[in-house]
Every structure is written in C-alpha cells, then in structure tokens.
Image (cartoon, rainbow, N blue to C red):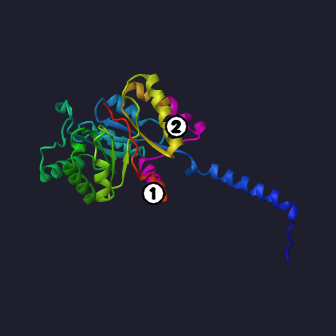
Amino acid sequence: MRRFIPFLAPALGTLCFAGAAASLRAEPEALPAIGIIIDDMGYRMAECREALSLPGPLAYSFFPHLSGNRELLRRATAGGKEILLHLPMEAERKNNLLGPGALFERMNREQLTSTLEADFTSVPQAIGVNNHEGSVLTADPQAMDWLMQAIKARGGLFFVDSRTTGRTVAGRAAAAQGVPHLNRDVFLDNEPDREAIRRQFLTLIETARRRGTALAIGHPKPETLAVLAEMLPTLPREGVQLVPVHELLARQSHAEAAWQPSLSPSPRVAKN
C-alpha cells in the first residue's frame, strides 16, 4: 500500500491549488466576455463593407427591405458573421425616418405579425432580432406580447432589447413567452467622437469584468469602425474575450440560473 508522507501534504496542496487556478485562467469560458452588435446595416454601403471586415465574431443587424442587403448579407454569411434583423419600431419622434417594415402601436395583431413575417423574409439569415428605435412600441405590453409570440412561433430565435427607453417591457415580455433575450449594456457611439467611443469601449470591458458578460451596440460610422479596428486586437491583453451574441446569451443564462438573486434588473441608461 502506498504510504502518505505528511510533510509533503502542504506543498502538494499548494501545487494542486496553483495548478487548478492556472487551469481556470486558461479556460476561455472563465474570461469576462463581451458581445458587439453593429446596427443599421444596409445603408452607407462603403461603411457597411468596412464594418464586415472587422476581426472577430461581431454580429450585424440588418434593416429589412433594403436594396443593399443582398450583397452585404452574402458577405456576412461568407465571413461566418452572426446576422440579426434590425426591426424598426415606433419611437417618440422622427417616425418618418424608420424606413420600410416598421411596427407601430396602432397596428392590430394580424398587421404586426404579417409585417414581421415580411421583414424576416427580407433577412432570411437572421438568428435574432433587435429593435431600431422603439421608445413607444417597446413600452407597450400588448405589442410586445404579440411580438414575442410571433418570434417564438418561428423557433430558435433570440431577442436583444436595444433599450431605447427606460420604460421598455420587451425583456419582460420575452421572458413571459420563453424567448431567449439579452439587454444592451453600452451604446458605443451616441457621441460620434473617437475619444468618446474609446471611453465607451472601456466601459464595456469594465462591465464585463464586473458582471462576467456585457453587450454593446455600435453603428457603421467611420469613427466607430476606426476605434473598433484599433481596440479589438487589445482584448487578449485585457483578459477579455469577444464572443458571438448567441454564446453571450448562453453564458448569461447559465450565470442567472446559477445565481437566482441576480435576476433583478439593474438600471441602464437609455439611448437618447
């Protein structure tokens, strides 16, 4: 029988602990994770093409029914990028700028559902949905219930609440209908200034370090693209991992299941 040598026990314990800690640090799943969605895809073709050339598993959210989508969707698919439907929704102002395929509070259920179906048909590669504008519609419980029921009926889709209003009930409606969902944590480029965008990117990293995961939304603006091209390669040095949005959702769902008291929503600043 193998003899146990007592004086080696502390050293062996230290070595085992150090080895376990090193292993934990090496596991990608143990790193803080961020996801990034580039919204407003389909306009400004040159900027959209440049956005699709950014490194890493960013997601791209496409407006429905735009003529430029065919080329851009082909490029995104070839690049293995995640594709979302950027769903226009009624806002408090400037609804004339929403574009085709928008959802409005005045719509009945059939109108809302048929409009949504046509939108999906125009972006058939979409694996998820996030709202464009929507400060009115995402605050309407009935409209959000209809929307989430329609999303659930298609199967296998998730919803990202862009949180354009603090009054949003979209996440609550998604949870009630069993639709996997995420909330936007950081807008990168409300201020189209490179230094401001860098600060928002650092806020994204700090949020992920604090909470384990964080999700940002940006747009194909020259300033945003320049900052992302500069800062995405620094993530390994920062000890932060960029992951697809569906993986971010899985990690967040796992963390919430493991720690139920953390499910209470934290306040986030809404986009102006």
Work out how far the residue at label 1 is from the one at label 2, CA to CA, in angstroms.
23 Å
Task: Give, as a three-letter code, the residue at label 2.
Answer: Glu
Label 2 crowd bin: few (<14), some (14–19), many (20+), radius 10 Å: some
List the residue tagged with mark 1. Answer: 260
Label 1 crowd bin: few (<14), some (14–19), many (20+), radius 10 Å: few
SS at badge 1: helix
Q: Position of residue 65 (x, y in %)?
A: 21, 41
- Which mark is first along the chain, 2 or 1? 2
Q: Position of residue 81 (x, y in %)?
A: 41, 45
Is residue 223 depicted above or below 6 in this figure?
above
Placement of the C terminus among the 4 image quadrants = top left
Q: In the rendered image, which quarter is residue 38 located in?
A: top left
Is residue 268 depicted above or below 257 in this figure?
above
What segment is highlighted magenta in the picture?
Answer: 230-253
Task: Give, as a three-letter code, the residue at label 1.
Answer: Gln
Tell me whether circle 1 and circle 2 mark residues in contact (CB < 8 Å). Answer: no
Q: Is residue 30 or residue 43 the one in the foreground?
A: 30
Is residue 201 depicted above or below 116 in this figure?
above
Q: Position of residue 244 (x, y in %)?
A: 44, 47
Q: Is residue 147 or residue 261 the one in the foreground?
A: 261
Q: Is residue 123 or residue 262 the one in the foreground?
A: 262
List the residue tagged with mark 2. Answer: 206
| Residue 183 appears in the picture as rendered | yes
45 sits to left or right of 251: left
75 sits to left or right of 87: right
Q: Is residue 1 or residue 73 the one in the foreground?
A: 1
